[in-house]
Image (spheres, helix red, strand yellow):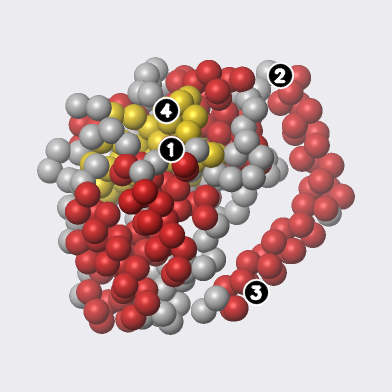
């Protein structure tokens, strides 16, 4: 059984990627890591290059490129590099974990494979609680088409464990057709299409955050600071497992207490320098203005691509 961890990154996400790999290795996880170049400037971190097999999209077969090209026709608010996560199905691994860069491993991810038998996807998130608002302009239409429980199977595309089942690729292609037939229903990004593919293919999926496993939420936004996270793990009714923290929603800047985990791979001096730079941006208002600009651009793209 061949297994591994699949990442997509470039120079811009290098610091997050290095910290992610550090967190993975610090748990004792020895799974091989493959990293596909996102686009733009390439990673030059010696640490990352030593830990990963680095690939370009060109290293994958023609059918993989055909899928990416097809995805681009409907995922109009999604950069091409984001779609490279689906290249994981074209490796020689039988089972794999895909992870975004803005993630920190909190357990040895090798244990996640123990939950995979009988399922095509294993994930640990509370995306199902959002009622589809981050995936669909009209979530009620998804319920109308796929049934009352359709939104309960929502999952984040930022961290999941999967089998290399090519029927899932067929389902992704069917989801592309669904997007074309229902252009006003989904938000045009890969997570929404991933969910639609799972509904079309009736994938067998296990969400570890739901009963009976009841793992803690993996979204960093659910915790105020590291102490809050530790208390959530240890001082609930019983010990709660947690697989990772995912800093999704916006690019983490390091100004929030829970983001302390993002500096775990740095020396004391580099950590303090990073925190000082973040503090200057935050206190000067530069971070606020940059955030407003990014949100405005994102909203405009969403309007023009509906």
259 sits to left or right of 152: right
- One can see residue 229 in this view: no
Write down the residue under mark 4. 33
Total marks drawn? 4
User: In this rendering, which labeled residue sits more in front, label 1 or label 4?
Assistant: 1
Report, in whole angstroms, how far the alpha carbon at label 2 lies from the one at label 1: 38 Å
Report, in whole angstroms, how far the alpha carbon at label 2 lies from the one at label 4: 27 Å
Q: Secondary structure at mark 3?
A: helix
How would you rate the neighbour count of disc 3 (Cα within 10 Å): few for under 14, some for 14-19, many for 20 or more? few
On the image, the x and y values in percent for residue 20 come to: 52, 31
Report, in whole angstroms, how far the alpha carbon at label 3 lies from the one at label 4: 36 Å
Nearest to N terminus: mark 1 or mark 4: 4
Nearest to N terminus: mark 3 or mark 2: 2
Nearest to N terminus: mark 3 or mark 4: 4
User: In this rendering, which labeled residue sits more in front, label 2 or label 1?
Assistant: 1
How would you rate the neighbour count of disc 4 (Cα within 10 Å): few for under 14, some for 14-19, many for 20 or more? many
On the image, the x and y values in percent for residue 241 come to: 33, 35
Q: Which label sits on residue 268?
A: 2
Write down the residue under mark 3. 300
Q: Secondary structure at mark 2?
A: helix
In contact (CB < 8 Å): disc 1 and disc 4 = no
Report, in whole angstroms, how far the alpha carbon at label 3 lies from the one at label 1: 34 Å
Q: Residue at x 71, y 26 (%)?
A: 271
């Amino acid at each position: 059984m061949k297994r591994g961890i699949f990442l997509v990154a470039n120079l811009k996400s290098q610091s997050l990627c290095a910290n992610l790999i550090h967190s993975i290795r610090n748990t004792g996880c020895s799974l091989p890591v493959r990293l596909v170049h996102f686009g733009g400037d390439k990673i030059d971190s010696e640490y990352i290059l030593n830990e990963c097999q680095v690939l370009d999209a060109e290293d994958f077969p023609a059918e993989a490129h055909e899928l990416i090209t097809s995805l681009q026709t409907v995922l109009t608010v999604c950069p091409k590099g984001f779609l490279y996560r689906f290249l994981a199905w074209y490796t020689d691994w039988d089972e794999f974990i895909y992870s975004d860069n803005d993630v920190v491993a909190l357990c040895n991810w090798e244990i996640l494979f123990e939950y995979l038998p009988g399922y095509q996807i294993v994930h640990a998130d509370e995306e199902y609680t959002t009622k589809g608002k981050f995936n669909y302009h009209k979530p009620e239409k998804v319920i109308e088409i796929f049934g009352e429980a359709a939104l309960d199977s929502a999952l984040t595309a930022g961290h999941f464990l999967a089998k290399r089942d090519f029927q899932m690729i067929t389902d992704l292609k069917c989801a592309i057709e669904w997007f074309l037939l229902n252009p006003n229903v989904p938000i045009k990004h890969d997570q929404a299409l991933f969910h639609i593919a799972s509904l079309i293919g009736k994938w067998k999926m296990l969400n570890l955050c739901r009963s009976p496993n009841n793992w803690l939420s993996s979204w960093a936004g659910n915790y105020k600071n590291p102490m809050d996270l530790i208390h959530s793990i240890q001082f609930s009714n019983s010990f709660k497992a947690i697989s990772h923290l995912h800093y999704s929603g916006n690019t983490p800047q390091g100004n929030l207490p829970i983001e302390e985990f993002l500096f775990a791979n740095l020396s004391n001096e580099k950590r303090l320098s990073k925190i000082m730079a973040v503090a200057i941006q935050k206190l000067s208002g530069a971070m606020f203005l940059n955030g407003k600009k990014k949100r405005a651009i994102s909203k405009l793209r969403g309007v023009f691509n509906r």
